[in-house]
Each structure stands twice: as C-alpha cells, then as structure tokens.
C-alpha cells in the first residue's frame, strides 16, 4: 500500500508524475498536515490587511513553492489565469474607491485607499494560490480525498470529490469526441444562430450522456453488492503524523498566531 | 442438469407500444457457456440486465439459483452469485485505485479488509495483473481496464458470469489473453458477442435473439 501523500506514479493535481527523485520536504509531510497548513495559511492571509505582512505571506508561499520544487514554467502558466483577473482589479480599484487623490489619469482620480486595496487583494490572491499549489497541488488527488476524509470532512462530499476526479476525464473525452465529430462535418464556431444552436446541442448531449453514464455506473455498483454505504479498504491508522509534521505544525501555528496578533 | 437462471415468458418494454423483449424463454444450465447474438438494439444487454434485476420485467417470471426473484431485495443475492461484466469498463471502474475497485464487491459482501485484500491480490495475480494493484484506474489502457473490470467481477466469486461484449474494442493480444482466461474459468456463462472466435472457442451453445422471440 502506498502511504497517502507518497509520490507514486499517480496523478497529482498539477499533473506531475512521481518519477525517481527523492521526495521534497513538502512531499514528506503527512497529507493531512498539508491540508491543514493550506487552510490555516489561507485563513490567516484573508483576515490580514497589513501590506507588509501580506508581502511576508507571499514570501512564505514562494519559499513553500521552492520546498515543494514546483515546476516553474508550468506553475507560471497556471498563474496566468489568475493574473488576468488581477489586472482588471488593479486597473479598476484605484478609480472606484473614494479617498485621498494621489494621481489623475484621463480625468479619473486614483485614490490612495484604492491603491492599497488593490495591492492587498493582489498579494492575498497570489500568496494563497502559490501556497495551495505548493501544498496541495503536489498531492495525489486520491491522497487529498483520503486526507479530507480522515480529517472528518463529510463522507458524501469526499465521495463526490473523488467521483468528480474519476469521471472528469471520461466526460472530457466524451466532449472531445463530440467536438471532433462536429469538426469532421465542417462545423466552425462563428457568431450566429446555427452555431449557438449546435453548441447548445453539444452541451445538451453531454448532459444526457453524463446522466446515462451515471445510471450505468449506479447499475454496475449495484451489481457488485452496493447498498448505499461505501466500504473502505484502507485502514484508519495507516500512518500517524511524524516528527516532521509536529514540527511544521508547531512552527506554522506560532507563525500564524504572530501574524494574527500583528495584523 | 439443473438450471441456474431461467426466464419464463419474460416481456420487457421501455416504451409499452414497442416491447424490446416479448415473452422470451431462456435457460442457463450449470456448466453451459451460451453465446447470445442478434441484431443491434434487439435487447441482448437488456436480457442480461433482467437476469440480475437491474430492470424488472412487465410480465413473466425470473428464476435464479432455485427461487423466483421478483423485487430489488431478491436480486441483491442474485447479483452476488451472477457477475455482470459491463460493455464499457469505465462504467464499472469507479474507485480511485485498482485495488479499491476490485475490493469493492468483496467488502460489500461483508468480507473483512484483510480478507478483501487477500482476494484482490489473488484475483489480480490469477489474471496476470499483479503489478496494477496501486494504479489509478483512469490511467489504465483500454485492455487493462477490461481485464481489471473482469477481476472486479471475479473477486466476488460468482457462480455465473454474464459478459456483455467482452472482446469489444480490444487489440489482438489482449483479446487472445481474455479468451484464454475465459476458457479456463469454471463458471457457467452467458456471453453477448458477435465475435466469431468467442462463439467457436468458448460457447457450448448459441442462441440468436430475433425481434421479440428467440431462435436457437
């Protein structure tokens, strides 16, 4: 049995296969420690408002990313999605929040309060994203589900999460097949009722097929004696948190307390 | 010969105006391997689903393992003794890892975790899949998926196997391996298939399903 969080040839959320390199410091942590740490970090940053402290938070997140040995290029590409949204926030906030005017662009006044708010939001969002990538993104999906279950998350939600992960790829393949079939018959996305209608059919068909698949999965489960309760093959006390987990736990609790007191 | 599963005058319709199966009689005896074929959409899969109670007939009765079975509760036991292999392995493999998926049936049957683990190990070993135990199911190849879903069915130690197009969309080596595995299994089988090899090498009897009725 592989231990939860142990890097094996599974699929982590960042899609990084295990490989032969020794586990990084973050990977050596118990998966539950990583979940709690990510949650704690996010809560601490969301409640904080001091720009200096938030910058320290971002610094910490970057250190975590280094410790987790995140692939730089792939992580940056993922961050781009967030940065696009951040740009809009950065561009709009200084002009939409009233306060002391520090600059004027094309007749619109930019306020100091708005600039501070924009900086806060950008720092928070980036720090939390990087930290989540470092702590949870390197975790195998199954291990994450199991960690949540062992931390007492509702069983149904955990199963929903694992089912989603399991069938996302099946649905995606179904979608691609339909899209390919459309393209094979010379369909090209354009603006117009024909295109909207076809896209509507595509998603409608995807829904119908998903529903049918759900029914077949349910039938297959009933065939194997499913009566509403999920058995679990893994022992509860598979591995306790190690010294490293306690150490990191203590250090991060101290840091977060400090952050909360100062912020 | 004792009959394991018997359908007497079974009628089933998704749409009452056009019944898929109309007063069908079918018997599976111990030791038999029945190849079931017929045109597409004639109700072959539905026939298998009727045998394990996934759909219930509008008329006629179903006997399985010495008793008439009528409702969902009756069929829970039937499903443990007659293993159904689905056409699409993706429908069957829903657990994150291979080991968990194969263990799902045995655990549902009330086996302990240690026993389930032993069964998983033995079943995968016997199908030559020992290395796949900790693999994540959606990363398996099509052939591996089919064999793992067969392992998941065999792990419940069924007396009867109901196979829905088992060799469909398999490459030649996997198909040959599957035929070999099936040929060595002791269970009575109903095999829905158009594959000539399956019919020639496995079947002891062929049944052709025609619109509404049945011809041997």
Image: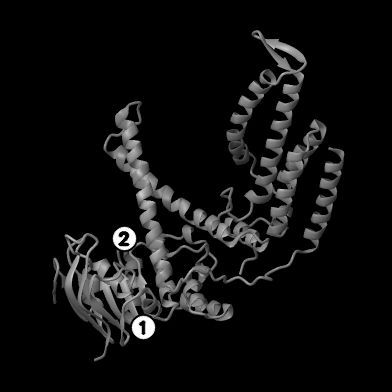
* Callout 2: chain: B
Q: Is residue A179 visible?
A: no
Q: Residue at x 38, y 66 (%)?
A: A219
The answer to which quarter of the image holds residue A187 is top left
Whether label 2 touches label 1, CB < 8 Å = no
- Direction from residue A240 to residue B99 in the image, left or right: left
Report crowding for label 2: few under 14, some 14 to 19, many 20 or more residues within 10 A (C-alpha). some
| Count of marks placed on residues | 2
What residue appears at the point 48 percent right and 62 percent down from the top-left corner? Answer: B137
**Residue A37 locus on image (x, y percent):** 74, 51
Q: Which residue is mark 1?
A: B159
Residue B105, given in percent of the width and then of the height, sits at: 47, 74
The residue to which callout 2 is attached is: B169
Q: Position of residue A257 (x, y in %)?
A: 84, 47
What coloring was used for the rendering? Answer: one colour
Which element carries disc 1, helix, strand or loop?
loop
- Against A198, residue A66 (above or below) is below
Height in image: A107 above or below A146? Answer: above
Question: In what element is the residue under mark 2?
Answer: loop
Mark 2 or mark 1, whichever is nearer to me: 1
Q: Residues within 10 Å of mark 1 (few under 14, many from 20)?
A: some
Instruction: Tell me: A233 left or right of A38.
Output: left
Q: Quadrant of the C terminus of chain A?
A: top right
Give the residue at x 33% y 64%: B87
Q: CA distance from mark 2 to mark 1?
A: 26 Å
């Amino acid at each position: 049995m592989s231990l939860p969080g142990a890097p094996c040839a599974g699929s982590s959320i960042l899609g990084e296969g295990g490989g032969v390199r020794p586990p990084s410091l973050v990977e050596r942590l118990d998966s539950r420690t990583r979940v709690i740490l990510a949650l704690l970090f996010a809560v601490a940053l969301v409640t904080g408002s001091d720009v200096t402290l938030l910058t320290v938070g971002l610094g910490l997140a970057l250190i975590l990313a280094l410790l987790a040995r995140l692939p730089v290029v792939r992580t940056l590409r993922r961050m781009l999605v967030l940065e696009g949204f951040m740009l809009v926030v950065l561009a709009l906030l200084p002009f939409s929040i009233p306060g002391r005017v520090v600059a004027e662009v094309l007749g619109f006044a930019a306020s100091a309060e708005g600039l501070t708010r924009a900086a806060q939001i950008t720092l928070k969002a980036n720090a939390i994203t990087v930290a989540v990538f470092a702590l949870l993104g390197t975790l195998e999906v199954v291990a994450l589900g199991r960690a949540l279950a062992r931390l007492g998350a509702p069983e149904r939600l955990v199963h929903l999460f694992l089912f989603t992960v399991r069938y996302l790829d099946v649905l995606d393949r179904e979608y691609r097949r339909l899209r390919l079939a459309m393209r094979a018959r010379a369909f090209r996305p354009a603006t117009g009722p024909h295109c909207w209608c076809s896209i509507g059919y595509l998603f409608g068909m995807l829904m119908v097929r998903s529903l049918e698949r759900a029914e077949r999965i349910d039938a297959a489960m009933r065939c194997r004696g499913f009566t509403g309760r999920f058995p679990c093959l893994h022992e509860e006390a598979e591995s306790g948190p190690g010294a490293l987990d306690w150490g990191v736990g203590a250090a991060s609790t101290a840091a977060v307390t400090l952050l909360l007191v100062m912020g | 010969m004792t009959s394991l599963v018997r359908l007497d005058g079974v009628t089933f319709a998704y749409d009452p105006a056009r019944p898929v199966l109309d007063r069908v009689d079918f018997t599976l005896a111990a030791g038999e391997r029945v190849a079931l074929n017929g045109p597409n959409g004639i109700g072959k899969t539905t026939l298998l689903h009727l045998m394990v109670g996934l759909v219930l007939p509008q008329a006629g009765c179903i006997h399985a393992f010495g008793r008439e079975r009528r409702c969902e509760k009756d069929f829970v036991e039937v499903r443990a003794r007659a293993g159904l292999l689905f056409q699409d392995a993706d429908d069957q493999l829903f657990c994150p890892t291979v080991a968990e998926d194969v263990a799902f049936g045995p655990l549902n049957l009330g086996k302990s975790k240690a026993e389930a683990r032993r069964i998983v190990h033995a079943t995968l070993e016997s199908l030559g899949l020992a290395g796949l135990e900790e693999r994540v199911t959606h990363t398996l190849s099509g052939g591996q998926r089919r064999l793992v879903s067969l392992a998941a069915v065999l792990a419940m130690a069924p007396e009867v196997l109901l196979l829905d197009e088992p060799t469909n969309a398999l490459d030649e080596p996997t198909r040959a391996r599957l035929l070999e595995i099936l040929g060595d299994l002791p269970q009575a089988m109903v095999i829905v298939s158009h594959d000539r090899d399956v019919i020639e090498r496995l079947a002891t009897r062929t049944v052709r399903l025609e619109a509404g009725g049945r011809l041997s």
